[in-house]
């Protein structure tokens, strides 16, 4: 029996778009949906050796169903722009692959599929339909089968009955009863799958159910009777049309030879490197047209990306498990002989200061890797080499700075080994940082990187440990399974390095960012995290109690104004009090249509309504208490007595570091209570805290980048830049500027470098938009270089898709050419500020390197303990205070050479607040 293979292209297009990561090519064009659909097509022709096939898509415009029901699909949102942009190149690729493609106006893809399926049955063919749409289950019969490549599900007649509770012959009746919310087709109100199955089981068909509708009791019976006039229309809308006039005959749907030249051009443009390599290898070897390369499904059933590569590579990969001393000795010899070794640790948890080793993996060449299990524990676990024995043997190599190592986020592995008293040296490359330097706006986890750059679907952590309450620790994973996962991690990391680093090395500016900034900072951050910060726990306890008392007092005031008690932590109760009882004006609504009580709303209400002001103050205190005074003491490491934050190096697109667990960068400093929290960050006995902070660094960078003569002159003269701006904008002498004018100028200065609009500026200053516009016009008239910089930057961003820092870091802006006006304008504002924020981030990293290097060279005992925004914080012995205090301005001020001086303010105190 011959086979007809039909693919519901429209269904898979949407599913691939939402299921896969945001893949993009070098031109920042979206490619994820294309990759997903093509990969699925590649897999299908391997699994089903079809005689005839077609990929079917919906046509643009209305269909006959829109004429039947004006509200058909009325609530469906418009197609996302990033999805619409992929349709044309996808169609080109499908045609070049040799797939017949059908798009028929006036009907949907389902109807074309139904018509072809019916023709196949009449010609005694077997028809396989690849779809994720449950509506098509009505077509299933002994000759028609559905498959879903996303879930690895096959639906024949028995499987349809098992899944839906009705036979394929009754699927249309079932669908009519439950309706289709996606297409806006109502069913019977409050009738779900269980009720529909119950009725059809009892009455056999929808028509018979309608005849006996009066027998159905209760509210659901009333709903059924209310829907009787609609049900025939519902069934008509949901029925797949199987008599569409098609532009081709079934026998015209034979697979055509691939157009390898066209396909190679498309894969080159789309950056589908693995598939492009396949084509070139096959053509080069004279093997002819590589019609289909088979794909293996991922663990989720969806053939992620290039799953054929995943399947074949895993079969050919040489992954070993080290369980004996002779095997260990052999691999130690191999890693000593290798010029570069990929290293990865498996651990008991994610906390870098607390977690212990479970195993170590190495890769010495692509597809050659080994896993060394150490502390797996489960029933029947094979004997493992002892941790002490293994680490003693590995210590010389691990600690040797001349033995080059690469890894994915090696700062974490460095911590884990430090927990076992080993100092990991020789870190020369890190794929996390390579990805970050190349594409700061993209995900940098290994699974995404492998998918994006190698076309490989890796084994996911959840696949081997499970999820949620059923998750097991890695030490409980079967060693054989763990070895596949861990060895693959090391192998993929090495392959990623071989792919990513050449891209960096060919660009001198990117190579500088990677080698001179990011890689040295990795080791410095490790030390800072290890150093930690001492806390005054008694002071935090006092502050927590005081905050609680202030919150109680505010609660009493709020109850008095409301005239009744209510929960100040309940948005619903606040909404009731503010808008239903006190009748305050509704500023905005939630997506559900109810009045919003968020912070922005309360900020707008606070000047005129005391209760809103009290609620804001209460929320601010509650956040301080829960996030800091209550939580920080619980985060102190029992072994060190200190709190150890984690500095994420590859998160912020601007290059700034991100602090978490705890977040030391978000401690508020605008309120007295917030500043008091910093008093709890103290120096140990015999030491002081020194804070060194760049002054107005982003404005100084703006002067350098824009080369505006007025700004350059003001900074060169050492003038107060906000007072100087006020003098220019208000046309006053410098000494005549008052405090209010200086405040306005400060808001203007910082607002404009963040791309603030006249609306935003008016809101910040509390003035009319026309007045804000006048201030902006005056500012740009006095500082024309700034206006020119902004225009140049917007244009460069639109042309390149990114902007650069002074040092060449690329700051990507995916929405810069978006068809969505709000997103595009947001990207333009980011383009203006990103070079300044990014350059400031680069400078503080250079400062860290300079300060750390000076401390190491001089042998001083002072330590870097925090980096927050434009500030470095050190813990300094009393006898080194004057030396460090005098040297920091020189080191930090000389970290970069700009056309304006870098001013560094240094403070000393027993705690962070007094030093700042």
Image: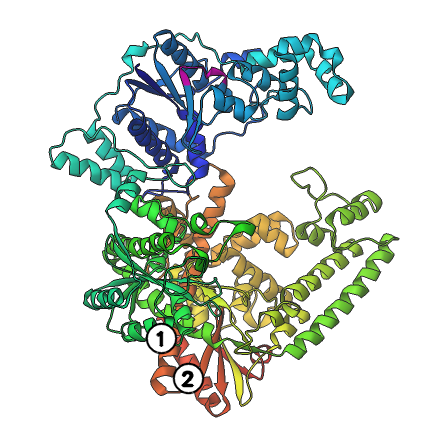
Residue that lies at the very extreme toward the bottom in this rendered image: 879
The verdict on residue 227 being magenta is: no
Residue 792 visible in rendering: no
Residue that lies at the very extreme toward the right in this rendered image: 563
Query: Front-most of 174 and 408?
Result: 174
Q: Secondary structure at mark 1?
A: loop
Left or right of 336? Residue 795 is right
Query: Front-most of 408 and 419?
Result: 419
Question: Which numbered disc covers residue 713?
Answer: none
Which stretch did the figure color magenta? 138-144
Q: Quadrant of the C terminus?
A: bottom right
Residue 756 position, x and y percent, is 53, 52
Q: Which residue appears at 56% of the width and 76% of the height?
A: 638
Quadrant of the rendered image containing residue 586:
top right
Residue 721 position, x and y percent, is 51, 68
Q: Which residue is mark 1?
A: 423
The verdict on residue 142 being magenta is: yes
Q: Which residue appears at 41% of the width and 36% of the height?
A: 301
Does residue 627 lie above or below 865 as drawn? above
Between disc 1 and disc 2, the foreground one is: 1
The answer for how far apart the CA atoms under marks 1 and 2 are is 29 Å
């Amino acid at each position: 029996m011959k086979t007809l293979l039909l693919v519901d292209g429209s269904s898979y297009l949407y599913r691939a778009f939402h299921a896969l990561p945001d893949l993009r090519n070098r031109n920042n064009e979206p490619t994820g949906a294309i990759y997903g659909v093509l990969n699925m097509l590649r897999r299908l022709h391997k699994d089903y050796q079809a005689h005839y096939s077609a990929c079917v898509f919906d046509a643009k415009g209305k269909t006959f169903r829109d004429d039947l029901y004006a509200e058909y699909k009325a609530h469906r949102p418009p197609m996302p722009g990033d999805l619409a942009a992929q349709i044309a190149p996808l169609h080109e690729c499908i045609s070049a692959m040799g797939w017949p493609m059908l798009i028929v106006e006036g009907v949907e893809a389902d109807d074309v599929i139904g018509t072809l399926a019916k023709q196949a049955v009449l010609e005694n063919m077997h028809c396989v339909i690849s779809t994720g749409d449950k509506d098509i289950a009505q077509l299933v019969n002994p000759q028609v089968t559905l498959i879903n490549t996303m879930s690895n599900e096959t639906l024949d007649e028995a499987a349809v009955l098992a899944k839906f509770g009705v036979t394929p012959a009754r699927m249309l009746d079932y669908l009519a009863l439950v309706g289709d919310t996606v297409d806006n087709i109502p069913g019977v109100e409050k009738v779900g799958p269980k009720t529909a199955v119950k009725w059809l089981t009892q009455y056999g068909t929808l028509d018979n159910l309608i005849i006996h509708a009066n027998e159905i009791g209760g509210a659901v019976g009333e709903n059924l009777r209310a829907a009787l006039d609609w049900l025939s229309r519902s069934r008509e809308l949901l029925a797949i049309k199987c008599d569409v006039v098609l532009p081709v005959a079934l026998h015209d749907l034979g697979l055509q030879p691939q157009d390898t030249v066209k396909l190679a051009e498309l894969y080159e443009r789309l950056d589908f490197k693995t598939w492009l390599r396949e084509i070139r290898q096959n053509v080069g070897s004279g093997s002819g047209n590589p019609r289909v390369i088979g794909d293996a499904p991922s663990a989720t059933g969806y053939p992620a990306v290039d799953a054929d590569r995943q399947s074949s590579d895993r079969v050919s990969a040489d992954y070993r498990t080290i369980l004996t001393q002779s095997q260990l000795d052999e691999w130690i010899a191999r890693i000593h002989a290798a010029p570069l070794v990929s290293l990865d640790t498996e651990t008991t948890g994610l906390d870098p200061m607390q977690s212990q080793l479970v195993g170590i993996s190495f890769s010495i060449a692509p597809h050659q890797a080994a896993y060394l299990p150490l502390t797996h524990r489960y029933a029947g676990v094979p004997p493992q080499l002892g941790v002490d024995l293994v680490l003693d043997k590995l210590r010389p190599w691990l600690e040797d700075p001349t033995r080059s190592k690469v890894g994915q986020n090696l700062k974490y592995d460095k911590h884990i080994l430090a927990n076992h008293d080993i100092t990991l040296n020789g870190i020369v490359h890190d794929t996390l940082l390579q990805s970050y330097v190349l594409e700061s706006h993209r995900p940098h986890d290994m699974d995404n990187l492998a998918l994006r750059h190698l076309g490989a679907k890796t084994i996911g952590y959840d696949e081997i440990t499970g999820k949620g309450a059923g998750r097991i620790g890695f030490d409980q994973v079967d060693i054989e399974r763990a070895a596949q996962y861990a060895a693959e991690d090391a192998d993929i990391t090495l392959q990623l390095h071989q792919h990513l680093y050449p891209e960096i090395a060919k660009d001198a500016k990117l190579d500088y960012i990677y080698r001179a900034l990011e890689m040295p900072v990795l080791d410095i951050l490790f030390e800072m995290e290890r150093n930690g910060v001492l806390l005054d726990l008694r002071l935090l306890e006092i502050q927590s109690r005081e905050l609680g008392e202030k919150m109680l007092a505010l609660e009493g005031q709020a109850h008095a104004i409301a005239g009744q008690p209510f929960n100040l932590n309940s948005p619903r109760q606040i909404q009731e009090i503010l808008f239903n009882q006190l009748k305050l004006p509704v500023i905005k609504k939630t997506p559900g249509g109810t009045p919003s009580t968020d912070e922005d709303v309360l900020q707008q209400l606070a000047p005129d309504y005391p209760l809103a002001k009290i609620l804001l103050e209460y929320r601010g205190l509650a956040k301080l208490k829960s996030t800091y005074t209550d939580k920080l003491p619980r985060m102190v490491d029992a072994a060190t007595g200190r709190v150890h934050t984690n500095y994420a190096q590859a998160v912020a697109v601007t290059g700034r570091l991100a602090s978490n667990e705890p977040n030391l960068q978000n401690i508020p400093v605008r309120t007295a209570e917030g500043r008091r929290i910093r008093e709890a960050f103290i120096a140990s006995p015999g030491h002081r805290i020194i804070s060194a902070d760049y002054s107005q660094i982003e404005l100084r960078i703006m002067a350098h980048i824009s080369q505006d003569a007025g700004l350059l002159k003001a900074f060169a003269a050492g003038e107060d830049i906000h007072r100087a701006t006020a003098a220019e904008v208000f046309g006053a002498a410098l000494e005549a500027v008052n405090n209010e004018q200086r405040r306005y100028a400060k808001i203007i200065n910082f607002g404009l470098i963040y791309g603030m609009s006249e609306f935003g500026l008016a809101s910040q200053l509390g003035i009319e938009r026309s007045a804000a516009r006048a201030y902006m016009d005056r500012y740009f008239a006095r500082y024309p270089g700034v206006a020119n910089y902004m225009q140049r930057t917007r244009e460069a961003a639109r042309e390149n898709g990114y902007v650069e820092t002074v040092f060449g870091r690329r700051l990507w802006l995916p929405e810069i050419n978006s068809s969505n006006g709000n997103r595009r304008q947001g990207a333009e504002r980011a383009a203006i500020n990103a070079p300044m924020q990014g350059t400031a981030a680069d400078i503080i990293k250079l400062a860290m390197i300079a300060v750390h290097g000076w401390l190491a060279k001089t042998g001083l005992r002072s330590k870097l303990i925090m980096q927050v925004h434009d500030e470095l914080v050190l813990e300094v012995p009393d006898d080194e205070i004057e030396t460090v205090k005098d040297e920091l301005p020189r080191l930090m001020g000389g970290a970069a050479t700009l056309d304006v001086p870098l001013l560094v303010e240094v403070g000393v105190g027993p705690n962070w607040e007094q030093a700042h």
